[in-house]
Amino acid sequence: MLATRSIAQTRNGFTLIELLVVVAIIALLIGLLLPALGASREAAQTTVCLANTRTISAASLIYAAEHDDRILRPAWIVNASPNDASPATDCTSTRDYWWELLWEYADMPKAADCVEMQDKIASGLGVFSCPKFDEEVYRSMPSDLPGAAGIRNNPKAYGLNDRFQPSSVASSDIFGRTTYMYPEPLARISKIRVPTQTAFIADNAGESKLSDYSLARLSKIQPAGNLTTAQAITFPRHQNGSVVNVGYLDGHAGTIRTSDLPLAEFRDSYAGPKNDRIFWIGSLQ
């Protein structure tokens, strides 16, 4: 009787070896699942950023429909010319930025002023914030990088393309500060020959305006002759810097490989065919 009870008692529990096997199997399953979960999270964040660029592009079309078909600039001096008649809502009361003017068109929650807008963007609220954008990384970027001063103070996840806009002319205001006046009207969407291939907005390395070097920083691709070795710092975002989200002038958005970005065609000094610059200027009519 005692022997039978002893055997029954030993069969009611697990041995140490059996427990270790179970723990090892669980650890193995976790190891297999974590990379997949990480990849899914990465894909979801990229999708959110892509949806944001699509929403912003669509909002720009609504804005243009209410403003004589004009395409927004990344920023301009308030009331610099009759064509730039826009409310003085910038935090410094001297500039209007594209995200301020598109705020209501992008269905963002009401904000009392520019400062509240900045706070909402910084908190990750709405379409002007990308979940893969780490604001603190840009606030601590080296001060000798091109555009670093503005980026460190007010980093932005997306930048606007203005290569199809009329050239600006340097001037100064009554306080002696350098400003930029725009003697020509803003470009019209109807004047862009290929809006389906012309960038309006894209993921960007902290600046509110697109440039060859700002896009290069996202892609680990450095445009020749533009950045020194010390300045060649990168901030890869989606898929380790292999793709960039772009919103186009017709309102659609897509993801393109960074290796396909036409960075060399950004500059006016580009000597190739004009149609090679469609991504930037849309072959203006």
Image (tube, rainbow, N blue to C red):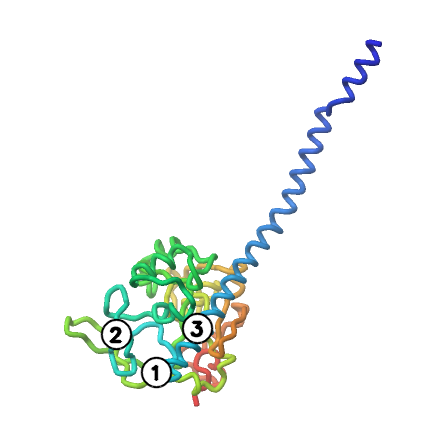
User: For the residues marked 3 and 1, what is the alpha-carbon distance in whole angstroms?
Assistant: 17 Å
**In this figure, which residue is indicated by the disc labeled 3?**
59
**In this figure, which residue is indicated by the disc labeled 1?**
186
Placement of the N terminus among the 4 image quadrants: top right
The crowd level at tag 1 (other Cα within 10 Å; few <14, some 14-19, many 20+) is many
Earlier along the polypeptide chain: callout 3 or callout 2?
3
Percent x, y for residue 46?
53, 61
Earlier along the polypeptide chain: callout 1 or callout 2?
2
Q: Is residue 38 above or below residue 113?
A: above
User: For the residues marked 1 and 2, what is the alpha-carbon distance in whole angstroms?
Assistant: 14 Å
Tell which of 240 and 92 is nearer to you.
92
Task: State the mark number for residue 78.
Answer: 2
Percent x, y for residue 35?
61, 49
Q: Quadrant of residue 153?
A: bottom left
Percent x, y for residue 218?
46, 63
Q: Amino acid at mark 1?
A: Leu
Percent x, y for residue 219?
48, 64
Residue plotted at (27% across, 70% down):
95
